[in-house]
Image: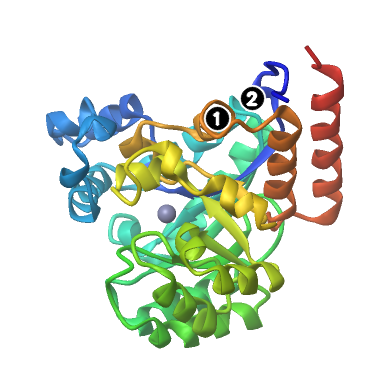
Amino acid sequence: MAEPVEARALAALPKAHLHLHFTGSLSVPTLVDLADARGIELPEQLVDSIALDVPADKRGWYRFQRFYDIARAAVQGEDALRTVVRSAAAEDAAEGSRRLELQVDPTSYAHSVGGLQPALEIICDEAVIASRETGVQVGIVVAASRIRHPFDARTLARLAARHAGQGAGEVCAFGLNNNEWEGDTQEWDGAFRIARRAGLPGVPHGGELRGPEHLAEVVEHLEPTRIGHGVRAVEDPELLARLIDRGVAFEVCPASNVSLGVYPTLADVPLTTLLDAGAQVALGADDPLLFLSRLVDQYEAARDIHGLTDRELAGMAKASIEASFASDTDKSRWLREVDDWLVRSAP
Ligand SMILES: [Zn+2]
């Protein structure tokens, strides 16, 4: 029998946001302000982003990367770095996020502030301030890039290790991002080992642009605690079961999958397949600047397109909190708030 129509406000559902990139977190107006301040002219397609209107055969990684690089040119200097952290926390606060794990490769911003270390220090410092001001606890994920040398990743892992912790403004995990087709995954195992030794769990990207064979390599060599995306694990049920058995959580970003042409429509994102298999799923926005879809939009799609009930949506919000790297005390508090959401706002 069909569930009754439920309409609890999803922005009021307490949740954790575990997959959000630094420059990609910006809203278009904030990016325009930053670009104006630096005298940079942004291409029309970026300002009037039309990601979802692009035909499926015109989507894809390289178009995405080109726009990301242009946007990043506007995010240079200490003030801009602080603006990004502040606005990401403010946007998340409006969407019911209790914990944001903001992913950044400080390499991209280092030259504008005098080095890798100052770049990370500024970001962590502002994360403390933004957490206090917005009530969203902002942790930082330091991520290496597949388009740079694996030794650069080791340097980043050592830097991240010096800031490791569970609280606001501390580095909570180590990632690997950029084009999944770049590089030999095995070569990053050293960086992930350094991170793990410092107590930093691995959260590499995998299983979005490439299928299960590549994802299996990511799992084998980088030993992730969470996987960025991982949606294409559904193409290999044995791999999916293995990931679930190992307790690997999935950071699923439906709008990203569609914008990058991985799936033709949101209905094709295998969200219910993952949930039915018992996967721990944390919905994320990935790059709202380019996909024009923020955190709550992912939950809306889960409700409207995949037919999840409020109880199932609350379960997913709880999974996001449990998969975060916050302290157990903070997690328990937020989990109770999810229960309150289900009880108090019953329509
Ligand atoms: Zn991502």
Q: Residue at x 46, y 64 (%)?
A: 235
Q: Is residue 169 above or below residue 154?
A: above
Q: Which residue was labeled with disc 1?
A: 296
Q: Is residue 36 above or below residue 184?
A: above
- The number of numbered badges drawn on the structure is 2
Q: Is residue 257 above or below residue 236?
A: above
Check disc 1 and give the amino acid type. Val
Q: Residue at x 69, y 63 (%)?
A: 165
The answer to which quarter of the image holds residue 83 is: top left
| Residue 280 percent coordinates (x, y) | 67, 55
| Residue 35 percent coordinates (x, y) | 23, 34
Image quadrant where one finds the N terminus: top right
Image quadrant where one finds the C terminus: top right
**Viewer-side residue, 276 vs 85:** 276
Distance of label 1 from label 2 (alpha carbons): 6 Å
Element carrying mark 1: helix
| Residue 123 percent coordinates (x, y) | 49, 51
* Mark 1 crowd level (few <14, some 14–19, many ≥20, 10 Å Cα): many
Check disc 2 and give the amino acid type. Leu
Q: Quadrant of ligand 1?
A: bottom left
- Residues under numbered marks 1 and 2 in contact, where contact means CB atoms less than 8 Å apart: yes
**Viewer-side residue, 283 vs 14:** 283
Residue 78 seen: no
Q: Is mark 2 within 8 Å of ligand 1?
A: no
N-terminal-most mark, 1 or 2: 2
Q: Which residue was labeled with disc 2?
A: 10
Residue 54 seen: yes
The answer to which quarter of the image holds residue 109 is: bottom left
